[in-house]
Image: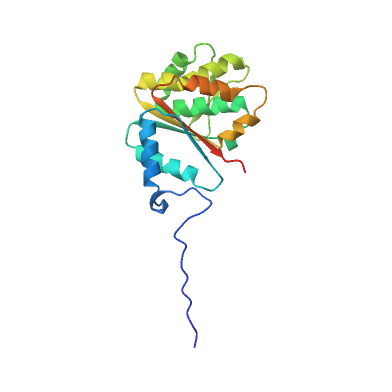
């Protein structure tokens, strides 16, 4: 007689971003983060790897999806240097805040007064801002002021998440972290979430 063995699926996902019905519990944390985001509070999430920081933030984004928020997610593991960070941050802010290309071009002219970025179209129909051969000091000022300018113009709130933020300390030649913190404290409609891996 052959004995049948039942196979049970583990109901919990591990080691990947968890969304939708797979996201379990943590209602208290989600509620607290949303309240802080509404109040433009800057948040630091620090924990060991695989503790679900990214899944938690994706749930927060899901909850904010119909609440007139501009949501930006920057993964520092994909950022190679300061210039790449400025390109990625500014491009994501503009493309998530404006949809029509003619309006995008107008706002870029309005927001970047000291530097003139090039707008490069990508194969998927999107775009990136190119800052080659632009003075880095002026560029940092312009880009880090962008969230405040956009939210003021759009009359919307914004949340910007920096995942793996500890990687910023590997950028050489510029104390970008110090400048970011100094700039961001003046943005009344923006909440910044810094996610870091706790060092052992």
Image quadrant where residue 57 sits: top left
145 horizontally vs 66: left or right = right
73 horizontally vs 40: left or right = right
Single out the residue that lies furthest toward the top: 114
Q: Where in the figure is residue 192, as x and y percent of width and height?
A: 46, 29
Single out the residue that lies furthest toward the bottom: 1
Which residue is located at x 39 percent, y 42 percent? 30
Q: Is residue 108 above or below residue 70?
A: above
Which residue is located at x 49 percent, y 15 percent? 112
Q: Is residue 193 above or below residue 28?
A: above
Single out the residue that lies furthest toward the right: 172
Residue 134 in sight:
no
Q: Where in the figure is residue 113, as x and y percent of width and height?
A: 49, 11
Q: Where in the figure is residue 27, as x and y percent of width and height?
A: 37, 46
Viewer-proximal residue among 99 and 188: 188
Q: Quadrant of the C terminus?
A: top right
Single out the residue that lies furthest toward the left: 67
Which residue is located at x 50 percent, y 19 percent? 183
Residue 55 in sight:
yes
Image quadrant where residue 64 sits: top left
Q: Where in the figure is residue 75, as x and y percent of width and height?
A: 54, 36
Colour pattern: rainbow
Which residue is located at x 35 percent, y 25 percent? 156
């Amino acid at each position: 007689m052959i004995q049948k063995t039942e196979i049970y699926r583990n109901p919990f996902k591990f080691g990947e971003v968890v969304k939708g019905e797979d996201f379990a519990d943590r209602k208290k944390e989600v509620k607290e983060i949303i309240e802080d985001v509404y109040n433009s509070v800057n948040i630091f999430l620090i924990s060991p790897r695989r503790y679900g920081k990214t899944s938690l933030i994706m749930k927060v984004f899901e909850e904010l999806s119909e609440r007139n928020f501009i949501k930006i997610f920057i993964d520092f593991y994909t950022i190679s240097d300061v210039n790449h960070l400025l390109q990625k941050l500014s491009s994501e802010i503009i493309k998530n805040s404006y949809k029509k290309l003619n309006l995008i071009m107008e706002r870029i002219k309005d927001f970047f007064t000291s530097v003139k970025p090039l707008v490069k179209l990508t194969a998927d129909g999107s775009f990136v801002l190119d800052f080659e051969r632009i003075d880095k000091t002026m560029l940092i000022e312009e880009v880090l002021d962008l969230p405040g300018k956009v939210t003021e113009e759009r009359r919307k709130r914004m949340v910007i998440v920096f995942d793996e933020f500890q990687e910023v300390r590997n950028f050489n030649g510029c104390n970008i972290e110090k400048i970011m913190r100094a700039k961001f404290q003046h943005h009344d409609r923006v909440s910044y979430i810094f996610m870091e891996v706790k060092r052992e």
